[in-house]
Amino acid sequence: MSVQRLSLAEARARISAALGEFSSRRRLATVALDQASGRLLDQAVIAGLDLPGMDSSAMDGFALAISSLAGRPRLRLVGESLAGHPFRGRVAAGEAVRIATGALLPDGCDTVVVLERCALEGQWLEIERGAEVRRGEHIRRRGEAVARGDQVLAAGTRLDFRHLGLLAALGHDEVQVRDRVRVALFSSGDELRAPGRALDPASGFDANRPLLAALLRRRGVELVGGGILADDPGALARAFDSVAERVDLIVTTGGVSLGPKDHLRDALAASAGLDFWRVAMKPGQAMAFGRWRGVALLALPGNPLAALVGALQLVLPALSLLEGGEAAPRRLHACLDSAVEGRRGRCDLLLGVCYVDAMARCRVRPLARQNSHMLGTLAGANCLIELDEERERAEPGEVVSIQPFGETP
């Protein structure tokens, strides 16, 4: 058993080594497009058609041949082309067709003139005097967005609304993805109650499971089993046994420190499943990684912010490994608004608000009240500020690494 604190990089490396075998035997599933959000694409997608699939108008206006404007004050209107209802036939010299946005460009036309530059008198069209009309104007060319045969999505892409819209435009109603990672999520502590239950003076509501469940579901995880565990070694063993054959990962919060009722570390050690305990980071140093009956288990601290930081630093990378992806949190760089302090020899992760200033620079404002139980502070944050093991302090104006929680500003 390792009692010395591992660096965050070492902890990730140990987890990666333990879980690397899973990437070669991942499960696959074919799902309907409306069920694919958050899933990892298993195979590259090659476009089977052009987008757009035809030359069409980008504006409401009139389609014509540019040569028809030479020396002719007026053009004869011979019909219209609407989206889904194209003009049939060829437009001859001196003729024009009214056209709607997205409609097929008629044969014989090479230009669209927008409505605002035109005047219509009966069946005769006049172009505004002095209007500059260029050949090919306001035309969407076939295949200009995507050409047939292009690779449009790489294997391993995490699908979201952008990719699903593209897949639908290419005619896909289903897609092959890597099957969801199955996770059992437990909180532990005799003092915990599920939200909505009655409290006594010595109890409190369990915030960790709703917090982490939302984070995991955003990553496309399937939650299996779980619940609140009593501070009892036998209860721990029975709960883990009940899910071990149905999940890929067990995640727990609480019960992993050195208190008299913290039994999880000892339970792992007794089953010869403890890989490491304690990581050199704040918040969240009291965490453990191991196996329970062959299933990977990550035990996070009980304080909500510490649990979240541990999940972001170690659980999400573990999920990526189980899916066959890479184990690295997403990072950006930002200029600090005010100084932050850490401690050499550990990674400090602080709550912040990142934003773009008037000069289009990415900046980050550290938040006060960083204690690991303060959920009110977490609700106002949108990123973590990362000070690595070599930095004890960062001054205002210095560039630091940040880990955004979601969309960047």
Image: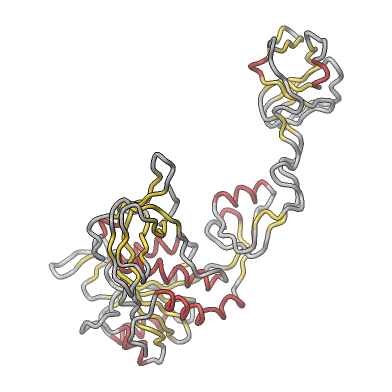
Query: What colour scheme has been applied to the protein in the rendered image?
Result: secondary structure
Q: Residue at x 76, y 53 (%)?
A: 149
Q: Residue at x 47, y 70 (%)?
A: 317
Determine whether, in the image, residue 120 is placed left or right of residue 327: right
Q: With respect to residue 122, does 409 lie above or below?
A: below
Q: Residue at x 72, y 31 (%)?
A: 139
Numbered circles on residues, count: 0
Place of residue 198 in the rendered image (x, y in percent of width and height, measured from the top left): 19, 64
Place of residue 268 in the rendered image (x, y in percent of width and height, measured from the top left): 37, 87
Q: With respect to residue 207, does 57 lie above or below?
A: above
Place of residue 86 in the rendered image (x, y in percent of width and height, measured from the top left): 77, 29
Q: With respect to residue 327, does 2 lie above or below?
A: below
Q: Quadrant of residue 123?
A: top right
Q: Quadrant of residue 304?
A: bottom left
Q: Residue at x 40, y 80 (%)?
A: 289
Determine whether, in the image, residue 84 is placed left or right of residue 254: right
Q: Quadrant of residue 208?
A: bottom left
| Residue sitting nearer the eye, 170 or 358 | 358
Determine whether, in the image, residue 343 is placed left or right of residue 204: right
| Residue sitting nearer the eye, 152 or 365 | 365
| Residue sitting nearer the eye, 325 or 339 | 339
The quadrant in which the N terminus is found is bottom left
Place of residue 301 in the rendered image (x, y in percent of width and height, measured from the top left): 30, 73
Farthest left residue in view: 201
